[in-house]
């Protein structure tokens, strides 16, 4: 049930092509990120995720052996499989559980002392790597840039090939990477001299992994949900591009995070900081930064330069926003507080229309009802792009 989902199929393909334990751990982390688990306790989930993150972080730091990384990965996989199946009211397959237990017993078998001498990111398996691949880079470079298990897209591979062909391009790139590695190595040596033994270093790494686990859990559980609903003149704007920028970025030059939605929309068009939506589609954006609020812009995609449709909205993690086209060829952003109030009161509105609810508004909390009425009024809705950044930002979260 879990592996048959789009996220499960993607994780299975990534794990089958992986040749190291950290790469398999990243595939499991992405499967966790894309799989909802509302009944999983947040504290237990953060502890589980910190152990999974320790597989990659400990291997990068050279503190974790192949034996330790394998045990952590087996325990993480068993725990996730049990909880994910409990979410859909299914039992863990006995044959699969026995195979996972056999892997653990093999690690603890007669060769366990030899496995402790191997590094945690030791590459195993057969096959050949593509010519333009991160797997062909030296081990020190893969560790420093956290490139274990990273697959280059066609555009990235083409750009890397062009940089290698240009005269002096490869030399400049390698020189910059070498300088960055020297600075990072110097910082690690300074920290290592202050930490002392390996036990203290491992404790510091676990604490760092736990902090990162809380950040990832916040990104997963508090997405910015955006839906493009039909409105007057939507025929002229069949598709929009939604971008999130840093709140301090006055020029809005580069969106936060990365974009995976260049060719999709709806559920397939969910990205870190960029999403493409058609009428009736929605997305959940989870920017990969520590910031809580972002600047949201809406464009109409074009061949050369995208047309700005809306500007000046502050979007926070956990917000629900509706993008509504207008008759003058612009769009408006409305805080979808009715759905948020229904979720908190466990009411079934029976409709995605924030104004067409069949629920009794008297059952809603007074604070949420006041916010919904205030932000749904025409004066509180976001202005068009002609108003610029002077419009009041919405705070729907």
Image (spheres, rainbow, N blue to C red):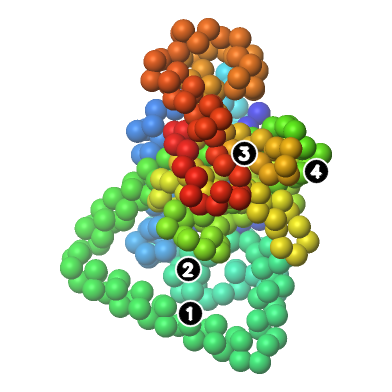
Determine whether, in the image, residue 258 is placed left or right of residue 199. Answer: right
- Label 1 element class: helix
Give the residue pinned by disc 2: 145
Horizontal and vertical percent for residue 219? 46, 42
Dot 1 or dot 3, earlier in sequence: 1
Q: Nearer the viewer, residue 180 or 312?
A: 312
- Whether label 2 touches label 1, CB < 8 Å: yes
Q: Quadrant of the C terminus?
A: top left
Determine whether, in the image, residue 188 is placed left or right of residue 129. Answer: left
- In the figure, 275 relative to 92: above or below? below
Give the residue pinned by disc 3: 332
Dot 4 or dot 1, earlier in sequence: 1
Dot 4 or dot 3, earlier in sequence: 4
The reply to whether residue 312 is in sight is yes
- Find the distance from the CA under tag 4 to the CA under tag 1: 47 Å
Horizontal and vertical percent for residue 20? 54, 58
Give the residue pinned by disc 4: 236
Q: Quadrant of the N terminus?
A: top right
* Residue depicted at x 23% and y 73%: 190
Label 1 Cα neighbours within 10 Å, binned few <14 / some 14-19 / many ≥20: some
């Amino acid at each position: 049930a879990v592996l048959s989902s789009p996220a499960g199929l993607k994780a299975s393909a990534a794990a089958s092509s992986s040749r190291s334990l950290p790469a398999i751990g990243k595939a499991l982390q992405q499967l966790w990120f894309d799989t909802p688990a509302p009944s999983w306790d947040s504290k237990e989930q953060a502890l589980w995720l910190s152990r999974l993150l320790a597989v990659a972080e400990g291997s990068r730091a050279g503190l974790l052996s192949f034996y330790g990384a394998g045990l952590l990965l087996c325990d993480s996989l068993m725990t996730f499989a049990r909880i994910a199946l409990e979410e859909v009211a299914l039992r863990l397959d006995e044959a699969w559980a026995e195979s996972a237990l056999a892997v653990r017993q093999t690690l603890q078998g007669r060769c366990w002392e030899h496995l402790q001498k191997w590094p945690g990111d030791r590459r195993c398996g057969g096959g050949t790597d593509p010519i333009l691949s991160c797997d062909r880079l030296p081990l020190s470079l893969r560790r420093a840039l956290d490139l274990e298990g990273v697959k280059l897209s066609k555009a990235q591979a083409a750009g890397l090939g062009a940089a290698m062909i240009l005269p002096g391009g490869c030399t400049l790139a390698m020189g910059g990477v070498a300088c960055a590695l020297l600075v990072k190595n110097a910082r690690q040596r300074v920290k290592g001299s202050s930490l002392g033994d390996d036990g203290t270093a491992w404790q510091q790494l676990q604490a760092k992994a736990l902090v990162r686990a809380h950040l990832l859990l916040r990104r997963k559980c508090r997405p910015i949900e955006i839906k493009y609903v039909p409105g007057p003149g939507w025929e002229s704007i069949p598709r929009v591009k939604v971008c999130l920028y840093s709140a301090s970025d006055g020029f809005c030059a580069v969106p936060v995070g990365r974009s995976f939605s260049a060719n999709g929309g709806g559920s397939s068009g969910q990205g870190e900081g960029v999403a493409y939506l058609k009428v009736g589609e929605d997305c959940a954006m989870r920017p990969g930064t520590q910031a809580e609020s972002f600047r949201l812009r809406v464009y109409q995609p074009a061949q050369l330069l995208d047309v700005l449709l809306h500007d000046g909205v502050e979007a926070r993690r956990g917000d629900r926003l509706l993008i509504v086209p207008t008759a003058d060829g612009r769009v408006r952003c409305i805080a979808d507080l009715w759905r948020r109030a229904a979720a908190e009161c466990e009411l079934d509105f029976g409709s995605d229309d924030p104004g067409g609810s069949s629920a009794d508004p008297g059952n809603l909390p007074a604070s949420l009802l006041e916010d919904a009425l205030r932000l749904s009024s025409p004066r509180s809705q976001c202005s068009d792009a002609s108003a610029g950044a002077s419009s009041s930002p919405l705070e729907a979260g």
